[in-house]
Image: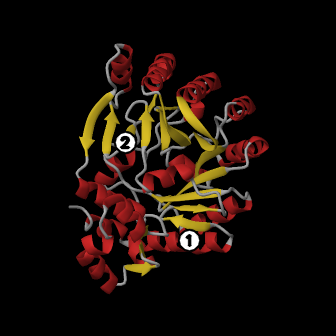
Amino acid sequence: MREIGLYIHIPFCKRKCYYCDFNSYAGYDYLFDDYIRALLMEIESNSTKDYNVVSVYIGGGTPNLLPPFYIEKILKSVFKNYKILDGCEITIEMNPGLITEEKLKIYKDNGINRVSIGLQAFQNRLLKYIGRIHTIEDFFGNYELVKKFFDNINIDLMYALPTQTFKEWQETLKEVVKLQPTHVSTYSLILEPNTSFYRLYEKGQLPIVDEEEELKMYHWGIEFLKEKGYHHYEISNFALPTFECRHNILYWECKNYLGFGAGAHSYMEGVRYSNIENIKDYIKSILERKSAVKEKIKLAKEDRMAEFMFLGMRMTKGVCDKDFKKRFGISLFEFYKKVIQKYLNEGLIEIDNECVKLTERGIDVSNVIFEEFLP
């Protein structure tokens, strides 16, 4: 039976971070009940036992802003309507400052076995600067609580933040590794339109880190985490052995997944779907028994091949010819001969065991390389 992942979007936040362009909103707590009612209807209306669910990911927004009985309702509906494999990875994203023992107990009792904590930085001045609602003291207290209930813990971090120094980035990683999380994600700041930071940047009021310093932070992080036993398995992700995030790997390997909630995306058998983003419009559509889908795109074969390449090459293992042939009936070395030769000559990709992967230099310019695979 084929594998599938489920993504459940919780679009509510206590406060919008200054860098965030995710589909999330502050001040909409009064919609909790209607939103969860609509979400449960969407989950149930897509019910199928034709796939083995290998991962469930509750993301946001800030899922742990919700009273925990809502999360319990969501998970009960998921287990009722889908075939959840034993050992299925079930993750919830959490923000420090909103974590309680009651919430953690309910999460664990309802099947959650992995948590992802958005720390971002280890210095209170930076946390305040980027609009986070927690302090490092909040995080320490919350982390001790989380360890009582969960063994599989990811910590999200950001680097190249405005005013952040190299020394502060080093301190952040060193302190995080002392806590021995099973997984660490490191993301550089990207200035996205419609964010507070972008508006400041346009006015020349945001002191950004230059590209050379950003790369220095990134490469130091890779080497440091490797020394501490973390496998660098994807451009931005590091895990202790066997703790790679199965849900994200499912995305990078272009496998099927269903997304539920406002603005959620799905990918099923070569067709991409995206839901209505506005929370009120999403609720209205579902409660009126209409579809939540805003857009549906059937990908041409060449588009699916391109996605398979550039998403797969985000992983350090690269894309293997046998997997490409199995899916598309042609060798990637034949179909992408010119692109592969070009970047081999430039030392930006390499071939290992019939698999194409980025070199260290290639990772630094990965977006440029990925564009070359597009039709």
Instruction: Name the residue beneath numbered marker 2.
Output: 268
Nearer-N-terminus badge (1/2): 1
Of 251 and 155, nearer the camera is 251
Residue at 60% across / 67% down in the picture? 231
Position in image of residue 281 (x %, y %): 33, 22
Of 32 and 83, nearer the camera is 83
How many numbered tags mark residues here? 2
Residue 35, placed above or below residue 114: above
Residue at 37% across / 84% down in the picture? 347
**The disc labelled 2 sits on which kind of residue?**
Met
Of 188 and 60, nearer the camera is 60
Of 150 and 87, nearer the camera is 87
Left or right relative to 214: residue 98: right
Task: Give the class, few, some or many, for how many residues have Cα within 10 Å of label 1's Cα (few <14, many ≥20).
Answer: some
Q: Is residue 203 visible?
A: no
Task: Give the class, few, some or many, for how many residues have Cα within 10 Å of label 2's Cα (few <14, many ≥20).
Answer: some
Identify the residue at the far left of this view: 375
Identify the residue at the far right of this view: 148
Local SS, label 1? helix
Q: Is residue 289 visible?
A: yes
Position in image of residue 310 (x %, y %): 35, 63
Instruction: Name the residue beneath numbered marker 1.
Output: 222
**The disc labelled 1 sits on which kind of residue?**
Ile
